[in-house]
Image: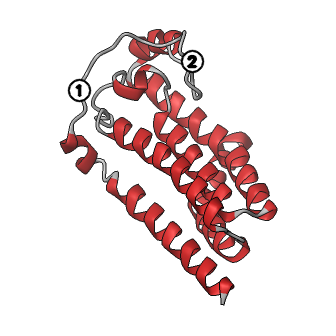
């Protein structure tokens, strides 16, 4: 019971901690044009993975097994990890690195575990077979499913994935502005 309540508390704190992390990134960042370019390139990969995943995701209606879900049971979280990695690279700060590592280490095992349990409850037989074929997080080219399906822009929009794009753009605009202000 204490475990569940701790999990619930951490789940509620995740969003607030993310906002704190975003503020810390902005305040602690020491970007250069090179770090920004590197970070943006990593973030583009994260955004592409998230967009690809959201175009295959019919939340709560069917188990997503096509697109990037063929290679990772959690491609949206993998995309988030790449977004965090890119922003950390762009911020060019050991403090930001430490905070991002702590954030992902505390919150992502929890949310991945919760998601796995939810999928097991919603799609028990399907998820068990799927879990034997597809890695939980990091893709493995030798371990994936053969499921097919096509990307749908309507699902991308329905899942409001454009918000990740907009939020990422805001972060990069702020970091570029900070760099310009630091140069003066």
Q: In this view, does 30 lie above or below 113?
A: below
Q: Quadrant of the N terminus?
A: top right
Q: Cα distance, mark 1 to mark 2? A: 21 Å
Left-right relation of 80 to 55:
right
**Within the image, what quadrant is residue 149 found in?**
top left
Front position in the image: 86 or 113: 86
Q: What element carries label 1?
A: loop
Report the residue marked by disc 1. Answer: 150
Report the residue marked by disc 2. Answer: 140
- What residue lies at 63% left-to-right and 61% top-to-bottom? 34
Mark 2, residues whose alpha carbon is within 10 Å: few (<14), some, or many (≥20)?
A: few
Left-right relation of 48 to 114:
left
**Within the image, what quadrant is residue 87 found in?**
bottom right
Point out residue 121 in the picture as x, y percentages from the top left corner: 44, 25
- What residue lies at 53% left-to-right and 28% top-to-bottom? 116
- What residue lies at 37% left-to-right and 21% top-to-bottom? 65
**Colouring rule applied to residues:** secondary structure
Mark 1 or mark 2, earlier in chain? 2
Q: What element carries label 2?
A: loop
Q: Quadrant of the C terminus?
A: bottom right
Left-right relation of 123 to 155:
right
Left-right relation of 150 to 105:
left
Q: Is the residue under label 2 in contact with that under label 1 (CB below 8 Å)?
A: no
Residue 11 visible here: no
Point out residue 150 in the picture as x, y percentages from the top left corner: 23, 26
Point out residue 56 in the picture as x, y percentages from the top left corner: 30, 32
Residue 159 visible here: yes
Q: Is residue 178 above or below residue 142?
A: below
Mark 1, residues whose alpha carbon is within 10 Å: few (<14), some, or many (≥20)?
A: few
């Amino acid at each position: 019971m204490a475990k569940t309540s701790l999990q619930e508390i951490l789940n509620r704190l995740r969003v607030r901690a993310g906002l704190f992390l975003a503020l810390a990134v902005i305040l602690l960042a020491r970007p250069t044009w090179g770090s920004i370019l590197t970070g943006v390139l990593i973030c583009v990969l994260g955004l592409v993975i998230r967009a690809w995943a959201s175009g295959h995701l019919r939340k709560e209606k069917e188990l997503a097994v096509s697109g990037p879900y063929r290679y990772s049971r959690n491609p949206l979280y993998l995309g988030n990890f790449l977004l965090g990695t890119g922003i950390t690279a762009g911020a060019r700060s050991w403090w930001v690195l430490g905070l991002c590592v702590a954030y992902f280490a505390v919150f992502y095992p929890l949310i991945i575990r919760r998601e796995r349990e939810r999928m097991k409850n919603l799609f028990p037989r399907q998820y068990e077979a799927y879990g034997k074929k597809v890695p939980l997080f990091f893709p493995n080219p030798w371990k994936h499913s053969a499921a097919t399906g096509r990307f749908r822009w309507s699902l991308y929009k329905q899942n409001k994935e454009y918000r990740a794009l907009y939020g990422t753009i805001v972060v990069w605009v702020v970091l570029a502005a900070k760099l310009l202000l630091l140069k003066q």
